Amino acid sequence: MDWITHEEDVWFEFRGNSPHQLVPGRFYKGTVDGYADFGVFVDLASNVTGLLHRSELDRRLESLDWEPGDEVFVQVKNVRDNGNIDLGWSIRQSDSEFRGARIHDPDGDADGQPVEKEAESSGPATVKTRPKTGKTTKPAGASTSSETVESESEPESEPEQEAEPEPEPEPEQDAASESESESDAGDEDRAPTAGDVVDDIAANGEPEQEVETESESEPESEPEQDDTDAEQEVESDADADDAEAARVTLDSIDDRVGDVIRVEGEIASVRQTGGPTVFELRDETAIADCAAFVEAGVRAYPDVEVGDYVRIDGEVERRRGELQIETEELTILGGDEADTVAQRLADALSDEARPDAVAPLAAHEPVAAVGKSLLDAAEAIRRAVLESRPIVVRHTATADGYVAGAAVERAVLPLIREEHPRDDAEYHYFTRRPLEEAVYGMDAATNDVTRMLEDRDRHDEKLPLVLLLGAGSTAESLDGLGLLGVYGSERVVVDAAPADDEVAEEVDVLVNPAREGADARDLSVGALASTLSVAVNDDVRDDVSHLPAVSYWENCPQQYLDLAESHGFDADRVSELREAVALEAYYQSYQDKRELIADLLFDADEGLAGHVSEQFRIKLEAEIETAQANLERREVGAISAAVLDSDAYSHRFDFPPTGLLVDELHRRTREGDAFVTVALGMDELYLRATGDLDLRAVVESAAEKAPAAGLAAAGIREGRIEFLTGARDEALEAVLDAAAEQF
C-alpha cells in the first residue's frame, strides 16, 4: 500500500480506545476539549485526549481562535509510558489541504481504508432529532403513526400500459410528508423513505422494486376501525407514554447509559460551548450535565435561565468518561409543577446541608462556645455546594491565614467533586483569594463583585458565598461587606479575635468566641477554621488534625500539639511546616497556590517542607541580625520601647514582610510586661505590645497629640497605623506616648 510511505500527506480518523494505539508522526483529526494556561487539550477519541503545548503553536495561545467542540488537525509527536500524548501543530487545518484521509482502526478490518468509503451507506440512516430554539415543544418532524404506500405492478406478460395518475394526497398526508421532509433536511446520506418511493412512482409510472415500509399496509377493502376501537388504541398509547415518562433521579443514571429518561430539577448553570448548550441540572439527589444542540455554537432553549425548574427528556450517554444527558425535549415548569419540584429540592437540601453536630478536634473552651454558629457556617457552606453556588474564601496572606483557608478547602473540594460531574468543577466552584491584611476593604470587595457579576452575566452563575477567615470582622471592613450585601451575596465571617458589633449586624453568619463571652486569646484562626472544616466534612478529620498546631507561632495549647503528634507530626515537623507555609504565603501573595500548599500541608513531603523552611530561616535570620543591630531603645513613661527604622534597615520588597519581622523582633527583644516594639516606615508603623493594647484608643489619643500627622488605624489585627510622611517623627512620638498611657 503506497500510502504507508506518505503518512504525513494524509490525515487519519482514529477509531481506537487507547493512547498506545496511536502512531507517532501521523496527523489526526480531533475535537477541541478545552484550554489550560499551558496549551490546548484535543480529543482524538472518546477516551483518548492529548495536549498541544503552547510551545508547539505557531502563534500565541491567546490568539488561537479554536473553541471547544471545533474539529482540528494535529500531529501525534509522542505517546508517553503513562499514556500522556504530546501533540504537534498542523499548518493544514482543512480536509482539502491533505492529499487524502485514512482510517486508523487498530482492531478492525477498516484500517488503512479511505475515510470517504466508510462514509457511504447502503442501509437506512438514523437521524437524531435535536431541540429547536423554542421553549418546550416536541422535536420537529415527530409523528405518532406510520404512513403506507400502495402501488400496483402489472404482470410482465401484459403489454406496457400508461401509468395511472397518482391521486392527490389527503391534507393529513401532505402535512406528514412536509414534516418528514423538514426532519430529514440536510441529511445527504439518509435511506429512501416511503415519500421518496411515491415520488418515484409518480415520475416513472412504476417502482423499480418492491418497497418495504416500517408498518404493514392495510388492504383498501378492509373496513375502517370504529370510533370505540380508535379511542381504546389512543388510550393504550397514552398509558404506554406515561409508563415511559416515569421520572428518575439523577443519582441513578449511572446504570441507565443508553436509556431515554425523564428528569426534573433546577437549572444550576448554563454554558455555551462551540458545539452544544450545556445545562447543569440539579435535583434532590445529584447534579448532571444535559447537552442540547441546535447547531454549533448556537444557544438552545434561549428562554431557559439559571434558577428555572424544568423537565428534561433525553438519552443518557457517557462522554469522555463523564455521564451526560442528550436533551431531546426540555420543558420549563410553572405553577404547581414548579412548586412541587422546588419543595422537593428544598426539603432534600435542608436535610443534607446541616450537620447533626460539631465534634471539635480537641477540647478547647472558646471553640465549644461557638458550637451553634459553627453549625450555621457549616450549613451555609454545604448548602452552597448543593445549590451549585460558587464559594470564595478570603483569608490573610500569613501562615495562620493559609492554614485556615487550606483546612476549609480540604473539606469542601471532595463535596464539590461528589456533587458535580465536571473534572474542573473544584476550580469552578471554589476559589481562595488571599488578602494582604485582615481588612476586607473596597479594593478586595470591588474585585470580588466585578468577577461575580461577570460570571453571572457571561456564564449564568449564581452569586457566590463569600467566606472570610480571620478577616472582615472589624468596622474597617464595613464598606466592602456592604458592597457584597447590595448584590445579595451571602457573607460568612469566622474570626478568633473580637468582632465589632456593626459587623455582626451586617453579615449573614458570624463565628466569633468573644461575642459568646469566651476568652479566645489562646485561639488561632487556623484552629477555629480546622474545626469548621470537620463540621463541613468529617471525612477530613485525620487530614486536618495537625493544622491547629501549625497555625501557632507561640503559646500553642498543649492539646493541639498532642493531637498533631498523634498523627505523626512532632514539634519539629510542625515548626517546619509553619515556616514553609509562611515563606510561600509571602511570594505571589495574591495567588492561592492551591497545589503547592496542599503538597506542603497534606502530602507530608519532608523534602519539600525542609527545603522551603530552610530558605525561611536563612532569610529571616539575615533580617533579624540587621534589625537587632539597629534597634533604638527608648523609655517612655511606664514602658520600654524598641524602635526599628524599617525603611532604612530592612529589605522592603523581599521576605520577610514587615509584619512578620516585627513579630519576631518583639518575641526576641521584649522585656517585662510593659514593652512595645515598633517598626517605623515612611508613612506607616507596626506596633506590638506585651500586654493588652487597644489600638483604636492609642490612635485616637495620638491623633489629639499630633493633629497634623493624619494618624489612622489602618489594620487593627496587624497593629498597623498610617500617618503622613511629612509628620513621621511627630507621629512616632505621639503613638509611644499614647501607648504608655494604657500601662
Image: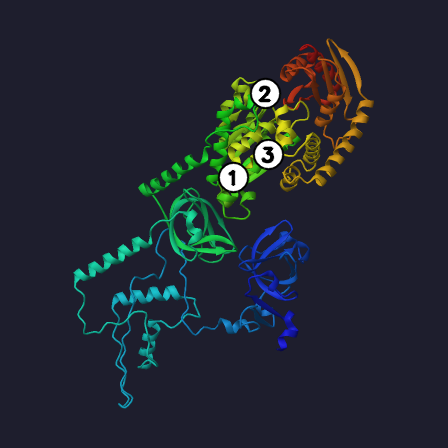
What is the spatial separation of the Cα atoms under label 2 and label 1, in whole angstroms? Answer: 31 Å
Q: Earlier in the sequence, mark 2 or mark 1?
A: 1
Residue under the point 69% across and 16% down: 690
Q: Secondary structure at mark 3?
A: helix
* Residue sitting nearer the eye, 76 or 679: 76
Q: Count neighbours of disc 2 (C-alpha within 10 A) and say few if under 14, some if 14 to 19, many if 20 or more.
A: some
Q: Which quadrant of the structure image shows residue 200?
A: bottom left
Quadrant into which the C terminus falls: top right
Please give the label number shown on residue 390. 1
Q: How is the image coloured?
A: rainbow
The image position of residue 88, as x and y in percent, is 65, 60
Mark 3, residue position: 544
Return the residue found at the far right: 629
Above-or-below relation of 450 to 258: above
Q: CA distance from mark 2 to mark 3?
A: 21 Å
Q: Nearer the viewer, residue 692 or 321?
A: 321
Residue 480 on image: x %, y %: 56, 29
For this view, does 459 lie left or right of residue 242?
right
Q: Quadrant of residue 694?
A: top right
**Dot 3 amino acid type:** Val
